[in-house]
């Protein structure tokens, strides 16, 4: 193990309890009756959604409520794991072979502008900075929905949707009524979320992002110019097709899209536990000091 | 006589309407609608008892019924020690979750979202949340140490009553060092007092620290700004941001 892997292994061990999603074989079995490969899953799930009539809330909206876990999602890299990565086959928390989660563009790579490619994709971010999630920052959108179970709640007044996450004890409140934009200078880890229904699909428009989160362990990133559009569609009684499109004129040449599944947790009495991060976490300071890693806070792209 | 009755009716209608409190907002299931963005207007997060002003701390009247806290003698000594060391010993100064009930009276807004089977609260401070199920489920089987406790709610007429257990001993009631053990048991009562106020009352029971239960109460005020929106104040992260800026300073000189 090189120094980076040793330190990263420590960092990952710190958050081992929350790496459940990462440990699941990305292609085992089928998901909601669809192939367990993100691109094939994407076609199949969208096709099923055309004829699936979701359960409804009392007010007639699609009822997405329940507890879910991510499938077809791995935390290593949205671009997939080919076997050449430094953390591949490591002794502790190894990366494992995984297909890309990107379904567009067709080459399934993040369409970085040239300057940005060397920062993301196991580049400057990975080697110089502490993964902000390891440092107990909010995981950001969409990474927050990847680790550990989450819960969607739809109060019957239809004015908000609440999305709760066990990972780092985080939450998102999605405004479902017409609301004005927030001032440009207000920047948030999880952004400002405004939602609406497009047929049976919950569409969430996320703005005011600070860009201080990473998308994955490989240090893939967006800047504070990013705009994220999420689409959540139930296509069978227990599976949501979760699609995320990222635009960022500062860092990318075009919008790009990733897809994974949110699968309902059906154990009777299932509830989210409290899993805070900073509380009781004593290793991040040591990781930073022994590994010489800097705090991120978007330093690699700020000023561009 | 008929004339007299008509006059009485004409007079009585507006008088009755004026005397009546504005109707409570209600949910489709008839329960009071507590949804909205709320905030205290007090100094309890610095000190839940009467206290004079200190630098950076507004003076304030306490929120404890009777003002005195029934500490056991050894616990009172610890409280005094906490107070002396509060700048670094307060768990809040380390960026940790403030716990319950302190999160309820941090000077930051929080949002209540509600359905027949739960009442959820999301907080700007620490980006925290609480979920209180009101579906009759019992507390989780302990022992558990949650920073925000395990909350179970039920309705007593128009009052939401929340029972909270399974705490850590690592949170304080305030910056002044008032503390509890992991045996803390809270009973919170949220009683709507008109459309824009909730009376918040919490009974504190912790036999390891206090000789008897005691009570705090305070109003929660609805934030009425047209665009009011919960933002993020993740204090632990903001501490890291300051640290990052300190580390960068030599580079920029």
Image (spheres, grey):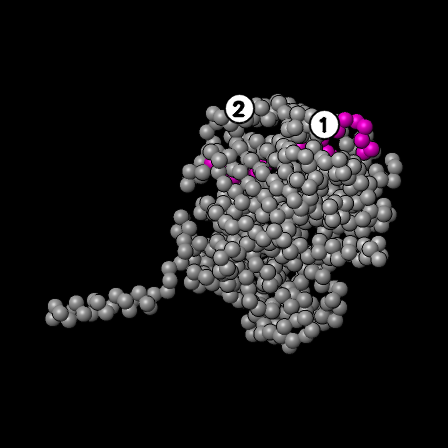
Based on the picture, tell me whether residue B187 belongs to the magenta stretch.
no
Of marks 2 and 1, which one's residue comes earlier in the chain? 2
Front residue (pair B148, A251): A251
Q: Which mark is residue A98?
A: 1
In the image, taking residue B220 as reference, residue A280 lies left or right, namely right
Question: Residue B171's image quarter?
Answer: bottom right
Residue B207 appears left or right of A7: left
Depth check, mark 2 against mark 1: the one in front is: 2
User: In percent of the image, x 55 and y 71: which residue is there?
Assistant: B65
Work out whether B181 lies above or below A105: below
**Helix, strand or loop for disc 2:** helix
Residue B93 point in image, percent of width and height: 72, 61
SS type, badge 1: loop
Query: From mark 2 to mark 1, how far is it between C-alphas?
Result: 24 Å
Q: Residue furthest right?
A: A2
User: Between B152 and A264, which is closer to the camera in this rendering?
Assistant: A264
- Confirm whether the magenta stretch covers residue A83: yes
Q: Which residue is mark 2?
A: A47
- Which residue is painted at 65% across and 28% down in the image? A105
Q: Could you say where residue B23 lies in the image, as x and y percent from the top left?
A: 37, 59
Answer above or below: position of B9 versus A291: below
Q: Residue at x 58, y 38 (%)?
A: A229
Q: Residue farthest to the bottom?
A: B52
Camera-nearest residue between B8 and A183: A183
Tell me where residue B21 appears, x and y as whole percent: 37, 65
Q: Chain of mark 2?
A: A
Question: In the current view of this chain or complex, which residue is farthest to the left?
Answer: B1
Locate residue B43, reporting x and y percent: 60, 69
Q: What chain does mark 1 sit on? A: A
Which range of residues does the magenta coloring cover?
Answer: A62-87
In the image, what residue occupies the spot 23% across and 69% down?
B11
């Amino acid at each position: 193990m090189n120094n980076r892997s040793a330190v990263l292994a420590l960092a990952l061990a710190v958050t081992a309890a929350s790496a459940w999603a990462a440990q699941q074989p990305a292609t085992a079995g089928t998901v909601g009756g669809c192939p367990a490969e993100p691109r094939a899953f994407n076609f199949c799930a969208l096709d099923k959604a055309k004829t699936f009539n979701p359960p409804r809330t009392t007010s007639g909206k699609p009822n997405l409520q329940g507890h879910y876990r991510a499938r077809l999602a791995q935390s290593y890299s949205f671009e997939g794991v080919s076997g050449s990565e430094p953390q591949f086959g490591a002794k502790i928390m190894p990366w494992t072979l995984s297909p890309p989660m990107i379904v567009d563009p067709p080459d399934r790579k993040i369409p970085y502008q040239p300057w940005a490619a060397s920062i993301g994709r196991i580049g400057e971010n990975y080697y110089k900075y502490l993964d902000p999630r390891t440092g107990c920052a909010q995981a950001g959108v969409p990474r927050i929905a990847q680790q550990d179970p989450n819960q969607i709640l739809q109060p019957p007044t239809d004015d908000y949707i609440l999305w709760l996450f066990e990972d780092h004890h985080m939450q998102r409140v999605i405004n479902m009524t017409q609301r004005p934009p927030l001032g440009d200078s207000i920047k948030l880890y999880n952004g400002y979320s405004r939602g609406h229904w497009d047929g049976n699909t919950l569409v969430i428009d996320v703005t005011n992002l600070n860009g201080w989160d990473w998308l994955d362990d490989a240090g893939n990133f967006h800047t504070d110019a990013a705009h994220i559009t999420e689409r959540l569609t139930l296509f069978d009684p227990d599976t949501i097709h979760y699609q995320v499109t990222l635009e960022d004129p500062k860092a990318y040449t075009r919008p790009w899209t990733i897809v994974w599944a949110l699968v309902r947790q059906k154990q009777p009495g299932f509830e989210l536990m409290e899993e805070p991060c900073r509380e009781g976490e004593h290793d991040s300071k040591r990781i930073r000091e022994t590994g010489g890693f800097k705090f991120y806070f978007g330093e690699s792209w700020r000023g561009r | 006589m008929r004339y007299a009755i008509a006059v009485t009716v004409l007079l009585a209608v507006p008088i009755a309407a004026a005397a009546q409190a504005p109707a409570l907002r209600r949910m489709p299931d008839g329960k009071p609608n507590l949804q909205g963005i709320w905030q205290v207007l007090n100094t309890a997060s610095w000190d839940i008892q009467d206290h004079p002003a200190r630098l950076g701390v507004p003076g304030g009247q306490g929120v404890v019924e009777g003002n005195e806290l029934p500490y056991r003698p050894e616990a009172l000594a610890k409280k005094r020690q906490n107070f002396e060391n509060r700048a670094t010993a307060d768990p809040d100064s380390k960026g940790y979750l403030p716990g319950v009930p302190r999160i309820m009276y941090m000077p930051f807004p929080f949002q209540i979202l509600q359905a027949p089977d739960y009442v959820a609260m999301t907080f700007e401070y620490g980006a925290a949340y609480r979920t209180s199920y009101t579906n009759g489920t019992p507390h989780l089987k302990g022992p558990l140490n949650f920073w925000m406790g395990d909350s179970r709610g039920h309705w007593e007429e128009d009052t939401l009553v929340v029972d909270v257990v399974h705490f850590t001993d690592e949170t304080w009631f305030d910056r002044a060092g008032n503390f509890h053990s992991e045996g803390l048991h809270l009973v919170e009562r949220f009683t709507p007092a008109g459309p824009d106020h909730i009376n918040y009352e919490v009974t504190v029971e912790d036999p390891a620290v206090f000789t008897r239960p005691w009570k705090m109460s305070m109003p929660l005020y609805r934030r009425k700004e047209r665009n009011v929106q919960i933002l993020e104040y993740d204090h632990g992260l903001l501490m890291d941001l300051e640290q990052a800026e300190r580390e960068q300073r030599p580079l920029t000189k």
